Amino acid sequence: MNTKILSIILAIVGVVSIGLLMGIINTGDDPIKAGEGASIVNGLMYVGYIVLGIVLAAVVIFTLVNIIANPANLKRTLINLGVFVLLVIICFAMAKGVETPLKDGETLSASESKWVGAGLYLFYFLIVIAGGTMLFSGIKKMIK
């Protein structure tokens, strides 16, 4: 029963999205850039926001249910969260903040620049960690 309801909801969201996308394509680039097709674009964006909100809510709910159901998962989750926070602190310490003028005349403050740099360092570290983990597990499987 639940899969039927989910399938119907997915079909409705898909049809609405396709209809809004066709409206954007029929309107064309120039009118949308001029702001004439804003309602169609906004409609498609709202559908995207709703779907994103539903997905995020489902992820948070099922994660919490899984953590609460098994106390060993809680300990592992807290350790992983602590390691992630430590990595964010390390990346923030490594980043340099420089006041930067932007194209629109605004100025990016040194603090904001430092956070951007920290985010980039964190992204690079996480890529290296993920790649190393995949490489390690691949080599481990080859050895067995």
Image (tube, rainbow, N blue to C red):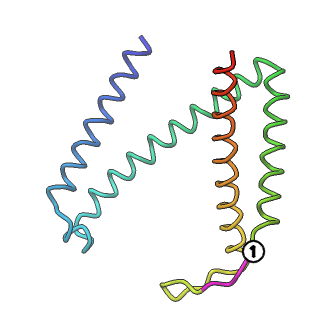
Residue 18: % across, % down: 24, 42
Q: Quadrant of residue 41?
A: bottom left
As drawn, the residue found furthest toward the top would be 1
* Residue, disc 1: 96
Q: Quadrant of residue 63?
A: top right
Residue at left offset 77%, top offset 55%: 88
Residue 47, compared with residue 118, is above or below; it is above
Q: Over which residues does the magenta segment extend?
A: 96-100
Residue 64: % across, % down: 71, 29
Residue 28, compared with residue 70, is above or below; it is below
- Tell which of 107 and 137 is nearer to you: 137
Q: Is residue 29 left or right of residue 134?
A: left
- Tell which of 59 and 98 is nearer to you: 98
Residue 77, compared with residue 127, is above or below; it is above
Q: Is residue 15 left or right of residue 128?
A: left
For the residue marked with disc 1, what is the amino acid?
Lys
Q: Is residue 133 left or right of residue 6?
A: right
Q: Quadrant of residue 91?
A: bottom right
Q: Is residue 129 left or right of residue 4?
A: right
Residue at left offset 58%, top offset 87%: 101
Residue 79, compared with residue 25, is above or below; it is above
Residue at left offset 19%, top offset 49%: 22
Residue 98 in magenta stretch: yes
Quarter of the image containing the N terminus? top left
> Label 1 neighbourhood size at 10 Å, few (<14), some (14-19), many (20+)?
some
As drawn, the residue found furthest toward the left would be 26
**Magenta highlight: main SS:** loop
Task: For mark 1, give the secondary structure.
Answer: loop
